[in-house]
Image (cartoon, grey):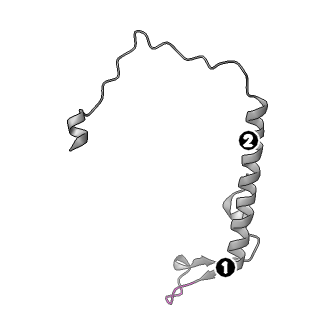
Amino acid sequence: MKAPAEYLNAPVLYLSYPTGEAAESVPVVTYDDALLAVEAALADAERYRYLLMRALRRHRTDEPAVVPSLVGSTPVVPMYSDEDMAA
Protein backbone atom coordinates (compact mmCIF):
# COMPACT_ATOMS: atom_id res chain seq x y z
CA MET A 1 0.00 0.00 0.00
CA LYS A 2 1.32 3.41 -0.92
CA ALA A 3 1.95 6.28 1.43
CA PRO A 4 -0.27 9.34 0.80
CA ALA A 5 2.62 11.36 -0.62
CA GLU A 6 3.35 8.65 -3.22
CA TYR A 7 0.05 9.31 -4.98
CA LEU A 8 1.12 12.82 -5.85
CA ASN A 9 3.20 12.75 -9.04
CA ALA A 10 3.51 16.49 -9.39
CA PRO A 11 5.86 19.18 -8.20
CA VAL A 12 5.13 20.53 -4.75
CA LEU A 13 5.61 24.26 -4.38
CA TYR A 14 6.21 25.89 -1.02
CA LEU A 15 4.32 29.04 -0.29
CA SER A 16 6.08 31.15 2.30
CA TYR A 17 4.49 33.79 4.43
CA PRO A 18 5.54 37.44 4.09
CA THR A 19 8.18 36.96 6.79
CA GLY A 20 10.07 34.69 4.40
CA GLU A 21 11.03 32.20 7.08
CA ALA A 22 11.32 28.61 5.89
CA ALA A 23 9.60 27.32 9.04
CA GLU A 24 6.43 29.08 7.95
CA SER A 25 6.33 27.61 4.45
CA VAL A 26 3.28 25.61 3.39
CA PRO A 27 3.31 22.88 0.71
CA VAL A 28 1.00 23.71 -2.21
CA VAL A 29 -0.12 21.63 -5.20
CA THR A 30 -2.46 22.49 -8.02
CA TYR A 31 -6.10 21.48 -7.79
CA ASP A 32 -5.83 19.19 -10.84
CA ASP A 33 -2.80 17.37 -9.41
CA ALA A 34 -4.54 16.90 -6.07
CA LEU A 35 -7.65 15.59 -7.83
CA LEU A 36 -5.59 13.06 -9.80
CA ALA A 37 -3.90 11.89 -6.59
CA VAL A 38 -7.25 11.40 -4.84
CA GLU A 39 -8.65 9.48 -7.82
CA ALA A 40 -5.59 7.20 -7.85
CA ALA A 41 -5.91 6.59 -4.11
CA LEU A 42 -9.61 5.73 -4.46
CA ALA A 43 -8.87 3.33 -7.31
CA ASP A 44 -6.25 1.58 -5.20
CA ALA A 45 -8.64 1.41 -2.26
CA GLU A 46 -11.25 -0.24 -4.47
CA ARG A 47 -8.66 -2.72 -5.74
CA TYR A 48 -7.53 -3.58 -2.20
CA ARG A 49 -11.17 -3.99 -1.15
CA TYR A 50 -11.77 -6.36 -4.05
CA LEU A 51 -8.68 -8.43 -3.18
CA LEU A 52 -9.68 -8.61 0.49
CA MET A 53 -13.24 -9.70 -0.31
CA ARG A 54 -11.95 -12.34 -2.74
CA ALA A 55 -9.56 -13.70 -0.12
CA LEU A 56 -12.36 -13.83 2.45
CA ARG A 57 -14.62 -15.72 0.04
CA ARG A 58 -11.88 -18.24 -0.74
CA HIS A 59 -11.19 -18.96 2.91
CA ARG A 60 -14.79 -19.07 4.02
CA THR A 61 -15.75 -22.34 5.61
CA ASP A 62 -19.21 -23.84 5.57
CA GLU A 63 -18.81 -25.01 9.15
CA PRO A 64 -20.92 -23.15 11.71
CA ALA A 65 -19.05 -20.75 13.93
CA VAL A 66 -18.19 -22.02 17.39
CA VAL A 67 -19.81 -19.83 20.02
CA PRO A 68 -18.35 -20.10 23.50
CA SER A 69 -20.70 -21.05 26.28
CA LEU A 70 -21.84 -18.24 28.54
CA VAL A 71 -22.67 -20.56 31.44
CA GLY A 72 -20.90 -19.45 34.59
CA SER A 73 -19.92 -16.06 33.25
CA THR A 74 -20.77 -12.76 34.87
CA PRO A 75 -24.31 -11.61 34.07
CA VAL A 76 -24.71 -8.48 31.97
CA VAL A 77 -26.65 -5.75 33.79
CA PRO A 78 -27.84 -2.56 32.07
CA MET A 79 -26.01 0.55 33.18
CA TYR A 80 -29.14 2.72 33.08
CA SER A 81 -32.71 1.87 34.04
CA ASP A 82 -35.63 2.33 31.64
CA GLU A 83 -36.69 5.45 33.52
CA ASP A 84 -33.28 7.05 32.96
CA MET A 85 -33.45 6.33 29.24
CA ALA A 86 -36.96 7.84 28.94
CA ALA A 87 -35.90 11.13 30.51
Q: Residue at x 73, y 41 (%)?
A: 52
Total labels drawn = 2
Q: Residue at x 72, y 47 (%)?
A: 49
Measured as percent of width and height from the top left, residue 34 is found at: 68, 73
Q: Which residues are magenta?
A: 16-20
* Residue 12 circle label: none
* Residue 31 circle label: 1
Q: Quadrant of residue 35?
A: bottom right
Q: Is residue 11 above or below residue 53?
A: below
* Three-letter residue code for mark 1: Tyr
* Three-letter residue code for mark 2: Leu
Left or right: 74 as drawn, with respect to 83: right
Farthest residue, direction bottom: 18
Left or right: 2 as drawn, with respect to 71: right
Query: Which quarter of the figure is the C terminus placed in?
Result: top left
* Residue 52 circle label: 2
Local secondary structure at mark 1 = helix
The residue closer to the viewer here, 15 or 44, is 44
